[in-house]
């Protein structure tokens, strides 16, 4: 087990260096000199440009620049935004909880709905319910979520007036930021209205971001359950006279869950990609919204640092899933 | 419980073996969803080819008396504009039909590009092994670490927003799928006897790669390509929606949705129809791809 663990951990080091290489390349490949872009239309004299380029190290050979970039990344310095002049790291940590809050709600929603639906479809294999659910699941997986979100706003916010259109909380509430998770902070502020407002802002984005994971989880649960239900030990359990529900929930689901847990873990990339679209539609102040804004403002340091952070995050979560899987299933520890 | 039943040997019909194509179609047609998907695809292809004939108007002509006209069956609608008009008086149906042409071109170009490059890289990795293999596959791992939409966004940020750059970005993002697939199936073929036989008969590496091994790896590739078509259309539409893909007035479906953002709250039709078009197209390709997989690979069938 220890060897397996070490091997996996060591393997991510070259991947991480590769990721930093790509994010380093980003700054050098975007059109325009970073110093000139900073001064924009005001312009800058050639002498001063050369001086600033020298100070920023842009006149040194590329490999030297890359090494110093690696050193910066290793010490946690991801550069400063060329628009707000704030460090990329501090902007990221301010906005990240909003994305985590939304993503956690979305994946919980997807599990809470997708898992039971998948189990029922497997148990009632071949019925109208099964076919209907599988049809819905492939539709959900094909959904352009940016359109789906706008349709939800049109129906539930504009026509019916049930939920707010955008943002995380209504303006009349102020919640002291403590954890950054608005729902948690509102809960502890004892302001019932704030909790309700935060919840109502969360509903639509949660559904929109959770749609594709929901479809994937339902499908995966169904096929994994079908496989397990065909095993001999299930027949044995039935033969012992156990009730149908007990066999399904206690005996089958437990083993069927292993691949499902992996799929859930691998949804992190999907969630972070989907967050870009969901946050843009609902003006949700998280990192997806932040990254899109950085492109519109040509704030390349933010795009570079943000991309690096998101990729590192996905890498760590994948590693976690890998290790958990190795822990649950000894056969893959090679 | 220990009584084992010996299954009776299945009766072998003495009829002549049906052709491979017939067998394939029998398996495929069993899946009703896949047949529906295929039918929708045929309609889309016909619409795309005959857009000039079928479309009631030009996709960019602006009818100045008809801003935001609702669909013809609604009050205030006009029979000349079946699905209504947008904010500058362009016929939505015409734009959708020309958009179908664009979407199919996007899907096809992206799949051809990433399938082509992915096949070559995957074959190289499988045949060369060693350092080349490690370098190629590590690079693919790195690409896979980025959420696909984010990587596409970064590539477009580098190349500049346009439809062709969006297609390149989506092709790069989907590249690892093909490379991994080709490498894995090529590796499993390489240990077979027929490859050894061809090699000892003096075939060169290129010949081994492309005419001996590759034809035996096509089944999973075809499935991946048809599923790749749908994700290419979806991702390109998302880029268009974010303003990073096709630029207005191109009638690309995602770009049309981006243009609808300012007034969709009072004109539902400018929002609903392009989105439904994307959903139906992507769904058709996904259903078709699932059907292909079941028909080509009975092992996966459930």
Image (cartoon, coloured by chain):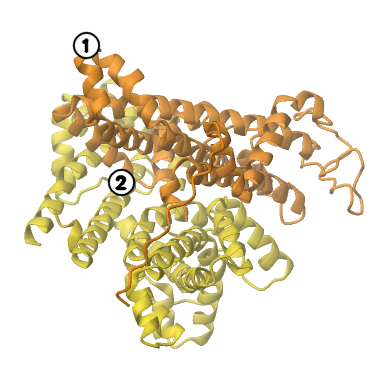
Q: Is residue B295 left or right of residue A58?
A: right
Chain B: what color? orange
In the image, taking residue A313 as reference, residue B74 lies left or right, namely right
Residue that badge 2 annotates = B145
The correct choice, above or below, for B72 with respect to A119 in the image is above
Q: Is residue B123 above or below residue A194?
A: above
Of labels 2 and 1, earlier in sequence is: 2
> Answer yes or no: do the residues labelled 2 and 1 have beta carbons within 8 Å?
no
Classify mark 1: residues with Cα within 10 Å, few (<14), some (14-19) or many (20+): few
In the rendering, at what x and y percent does residue A316 appear? 24, 56
Q: Is residue A162 something that shows in the picture?
A: yes
Q: Determine whether A204 is above or below B94 in the image.
A: below
Quickly name the residue at label 1: B202
- Looking at the image, residue B286 lies above or below residue A168: above
Q: Secondary structure at mark 1?
A: loop
Q: Colour of chain A?
A: yellow
Q: Residue at x 73, y 47 (%)?
A: B270
Which quadrant would the N terminus of chain A be assigned to in this image? Answer: bottom left
Secondary structure of residue under mark 2: helix
Q: CA distance from mark 2 to mark 1?
A: 41 Å
């Amino acid at each position: 087990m220890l060897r397996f663990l070490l091997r996996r951990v060591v393997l991510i080091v070259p991947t991480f260096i590769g990721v930093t290489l790509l994010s380093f390349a980003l700054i050098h490949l975007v059109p325009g000199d970073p110093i000139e872009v900073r001064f924009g239309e005001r312009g800058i004299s050639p002498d001063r440009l050369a001086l600033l380029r020298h100070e920023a190290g842009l006149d040194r050979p590329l490999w030297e620049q890359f090494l110093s970039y690696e050193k910066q990344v290793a010490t946690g310095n991801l550069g400063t935004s060329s628009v707000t002049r704030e460090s990329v790291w501090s902007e990221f940590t301010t906005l990240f909880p909003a994305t985590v809050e939304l993503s956690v709600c979305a994946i919980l929603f997807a599990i809470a709905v997708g898992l039971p639906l998948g189990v029922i479809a497997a148990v009632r294999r071949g019925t109208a319910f099964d076919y209907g659910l599988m049809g819905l699941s492939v539709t959900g997986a094909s959904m352009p979520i940016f359109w789906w979100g706008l349709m939800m706003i049109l129906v539930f916010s504009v026509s019916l007036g049930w939920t707010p259109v955008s943002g995380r909380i209504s303006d009349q509430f102020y919640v002291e930021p403590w954890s950054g998770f608005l729902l948690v902070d509102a809960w502890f502020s004892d302001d019932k209205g704030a909790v309700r407002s935060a919840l109502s802002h969360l509903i639509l984005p949660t559904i929109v971001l959770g749609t594709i994971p929901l479809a994937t989880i339902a499908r995966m649960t169904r096929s994994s359950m079908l496989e397990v239900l065909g095993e001999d030990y299930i027949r044995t359990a039935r033969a012992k006279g156990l009730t149908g529900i007990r066999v399904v929930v206690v005996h089958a689901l437990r083993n069927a869950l292993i691949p499902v847990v992996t799929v859930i873990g691998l949804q992190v990339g999907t969630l972070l990609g989907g967050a870009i679209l969901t946050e843009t539609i609902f003006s949700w102040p998280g990192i997806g919204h932040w990254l899109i804004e950085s492109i519109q403002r040509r704030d390349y340091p933010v795009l570079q640092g943000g991309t690096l952070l998101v990729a590192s995050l996905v890498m760590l979560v994948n590693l976690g899933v890998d290790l958990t899987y190795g822990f649950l299933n000894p056969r893959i520890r090679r | 419980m220990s009584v084992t039943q010996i299954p009776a040997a299945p009766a072998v019909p003495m009829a002549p073996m049906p052709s491979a194509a017939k067998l394939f179609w029998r398996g495929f047609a069993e899946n009703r969803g896949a047949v529906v998907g295929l039918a929708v695809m045929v309609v889309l292809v016909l619409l795309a080819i005959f857009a000039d004939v079928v479309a009631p108007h030009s996709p960019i002509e602006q009818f100045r008396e008809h801003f935001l006209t609702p669909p013809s069956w609604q009050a205030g609608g006009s029979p000349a504009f079946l699905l209504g008009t947008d904010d500058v008086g362009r016929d939505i149906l015409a734009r959708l039909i020309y958009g179908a042409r664009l979407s199919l071109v996007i899907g096809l170009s992206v799949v051809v590009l990433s399938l082509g490059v992915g096949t070559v890289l995957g074959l190289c990795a499988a045949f060369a092994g060693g350092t080349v293999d490690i370098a190629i596959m590590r690079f693919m791992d790195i690409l896979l670490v980025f959420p696909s939409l984010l990587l596409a966004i970064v590539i477009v940020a580098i190349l500049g927003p346009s439809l062709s750059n969006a297609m390149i970005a989506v092709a790069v993002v989907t590249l690892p799928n093909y490379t991994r697939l080709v490498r894995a199936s090529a590796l499993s073929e390489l240990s077979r006897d027929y490859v050894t036989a061809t090699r000892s008969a003096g075939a060169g590496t290129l010949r081994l790669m492309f005419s001996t091994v590759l034809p035996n790896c096509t089944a999973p590739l075809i499935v991946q390509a048809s599923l790749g078509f749908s994700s290419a259309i979806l991702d390109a539409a998302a880029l268009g929606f974010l303003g990073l893909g096709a630029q207005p007035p191109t009638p690309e479906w995602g770009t049309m949705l981006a243009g609808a953002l300012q007034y969709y709250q009072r004109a539902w039709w400018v929002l609903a129809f392009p989105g439904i078009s994307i959903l139906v197209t992507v769904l058709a390709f996904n259903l078709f791809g699932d059907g292909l997989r079941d028909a080509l690979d009975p092992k996966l069938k459930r």
